[in-house]
């Protein structure tokens, strides 16, 4: 039980980048670290909740890839770490008050958001909305594909592209670079792009290639990657 480890009323959860990545810790009320719950070369993205009765913390993170978001669980003593969601892509979850079920809003780069109800172990109970947009069947859709490349100083960056409809590799095409690139942000995510996705599809049908890259300084890749632009905005983003 949780009481056998440490009652939450005598401790608190804290997120920190002190080891170089955003992770979860338990501290007692005197400010002493009791346990580092999560660790590794990845950032915790969002706290989904704490089941105090069973002593379990739920959170989302991009462990398999900084472009994805999956649901994970770990016990309050730091054991029992496990991945719960199964489909690659982006998951946004909301738990029931008793933490026995959760609602999962799931999408990937080419799949509109689907909403489903699951048991806390990830077992599907029912699909609430399949997210299918029948109108898309009427259009020639160019899939969004991901790529990586390495800079001249050895840093790997993630990107995506949408090629023009009926793409011919022997031809040259105009390119729209769609980038935000601000500190901690991300435009390269394995998630449904909504209205922007449809705008890009229209451009692709008109012969444009659309590309986005998460430059140095963007999020989900640790403090050093994000903070390299501190007091150097405009340098490392385009170097």
Image (spheres, rainbow, N blue to C red):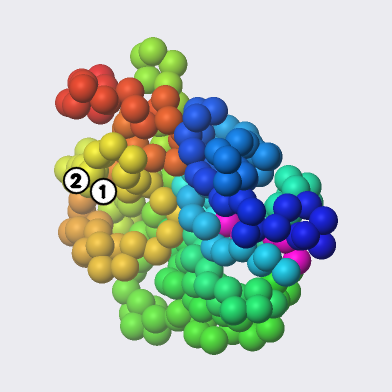
Q: Position of residue 190 (x, y in %)?
A: 45, 54
Reply above or below: 126 against 166. below
Residue pointed to by mark 2: 176
Membership of 168 in magenta stretch: no
In the image, 100 versus 114, the foreground residue is 100
* Majority secondary structure in the magenta region: strand
Residue at the (39%, 81%) spot, across then down: 133
Residue pointed to by mark 1: 210
Task: Specify which label sits upstream in the sequence, 1 or 2.
Answer: 2
For the residue carrying disc 2, how many other residues have a C-alpha within 10 Å: few (<14), some (14-19), or many (20+)? Answer: some
Residue 153, picture quadrant = top left
* Quarter in which the N terminus is drawn: bottom right
Q: Distance between the residues labelled 1 and 2?
A: 5 Å
Q: Position of residue 152 (x, y in %)?
A: 36, 14
Residue 156, picture quadrant = top left
The region drawn magenta spans 54-59
Residue 25 visible in image: no
Membership of 55 in magenta stretch: yes
Reply above or below: 12 against 2. above
Q: Where is residue 52 in the image (x, y as percent from the top left)?
A: 68, 65
In the image, 208 versus 231, the foreground residue is 231
Residues at circles 1 and 2 in contact by the CB criterion of under 8 Å: yes
């Amino acid at each position: 039980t949780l009481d056998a480890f440490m009652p939450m009323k005598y401790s608190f959860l804290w997120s920190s980048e002190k080891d170089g990545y955003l992770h979860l810790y338990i501290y007692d009320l005197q400010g002493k670290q009791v346990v580092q719950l999560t660790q590794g070369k990845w950032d915790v993205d969002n706290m989904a909740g704490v089941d105090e009765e069973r002593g379990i913390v739920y959170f989302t993170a991009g462990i398999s890839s900084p472009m994805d978001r999956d649901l994970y669980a770990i016990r309050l003593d730091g054991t029992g770490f496990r991945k719960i969601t199964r489909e690659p892509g982006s998951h946004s979850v909301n738990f029931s008050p008793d933490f026995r079920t959760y609602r999962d809003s799931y999408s990937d780069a080419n799949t509109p958001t689907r909403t489903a109800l699951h048991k806390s172990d990830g077992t599907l109970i029912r699909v609430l909305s399949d997210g299918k947009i029948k109108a898309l069947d009427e259009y020639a859709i160019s899939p969004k594909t991901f790529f990586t490349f390495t800079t001249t100083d050895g840093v790997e960056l993630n990107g995506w592209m949408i090629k023009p409809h009926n793409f011919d590799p022997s031809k040259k095409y105009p390119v729209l670079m769609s980038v935000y690139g601000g500190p901690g942000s991300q435009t390269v995510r394995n998630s449904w792009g909504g209205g922007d996705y449809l705008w890009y599809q229209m451009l692709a049908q008109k012969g444009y290639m659309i590309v986005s890259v998460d430059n140095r300084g963007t999020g989900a890749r640790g403090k050093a990657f994000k903070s390299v632009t501190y007091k150097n905005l405009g340098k490392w983003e385009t170097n």
